Image (cartoon, grey):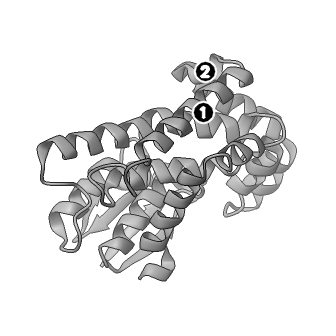
Amino acid sequence: MVVLHQYHMSPFNQKLQRMLRYKGIAFEERYWLLVEQGKLKREHNPIGKLPAIEHNSEWVCDSTDAAHYIEQQFAGPSLIPEDPALAGMVHVLEDWADESLYFYEMHMRFTTEHNWERNLPRMFEREGWFLKSVLAGKMPGQIRKGIRKITATQGIGRKSERQLLVDCRRHINAVAGMLEQSDFLVGGQLTLADLAVHAMFSCFLDTVELEAMMQEYPGVVAWMARVEALTGPQAT
């Protein structure tokens, strides 16, 4: 049995959930509380990073490493093409989603007006009473500042919201262009690239501005529906 270890509301959870469902792999989900991070670091992963998969007493603690482990260890439809050129494109798009789009969704969801007040409480809804009532309930401004510091260090958080929206439109438009001649992003079939980008675009929908923007791209909306039909809970 595979166990998928997760923190609540991480888009990287979606990537692995959908991959496991698509390949027909039975799995259990275990959500860790933020206060358990010390235990996680001591016993399983020194950097405390999730999601991770546990299989045959082995932990794989990075979502990309976990995806490649799943692809190598389990049968089922492949999500990484054998063709080197296509596999390379899948890698580039997954890395773009994980290392660039991720910070856009983080900043837009948890620090911008009209969005952070709604999304921050959701971040803590699985936590114990202290984090839920004290930190999320009485100190949301400090948490917002902490997230802004993370995105500022990365670079995206130093941009104005207006510029971020310009950037996000370029990103969505780029995906729309890739889908003009194909149902999926690489090679005309579902791949890890679709799952990675879909996960971040799903988080875009948690923001007022980006949800409205996404509706301007019916091809992208239809692609998201195709990915969900193949990899959602109903697909298992």
For label 2, the residue is: 152
Q: Residue at x 61, y 50 (%)?
A: 203
Residue 187 position within the rendered picture, expressed as x and y whole percent measured from the top left: 26, 52
Classed neighbour count for the residue bearing mark 1: other residues with Cα under 10 Å, few (<14), some (14–19), many (≥20): some
- Along the horizontal axis of the image, is 112 left or right of 103? right
Residue 11 position within the rendered picture, expressed as x and y whole percent measured from the top left: 52, 52
Asked which secondary structure carries label 2, the reply is: helix
Q: Nearer the viewer, residue 210 or 113?
A: 210
Residue furthest to the right in view is 138
Q: Name the disc covering residue 212, or none.
A: none
The part of the image, by quadrant, that contains residue 15 is bottom left
Residue 227 position within the rendered picture, expressed as x and y whole percent measured from the top left: 45, 64
Kind of residue at disc 2: Ala
Q: CA distance from mark 1 to mark 2?
A: 17 Å
Kind of residue at disc 1: Cys
Residue 61 visible in the picture: no
Q: Of the residues under marks 1 and 2, which one precedes in the sequence?
A: 2
Q: Nearer the viewer, residue 162 or 119?
A: 162
- Image: 163 above or below 118: above
For label 1, the residue is: 168
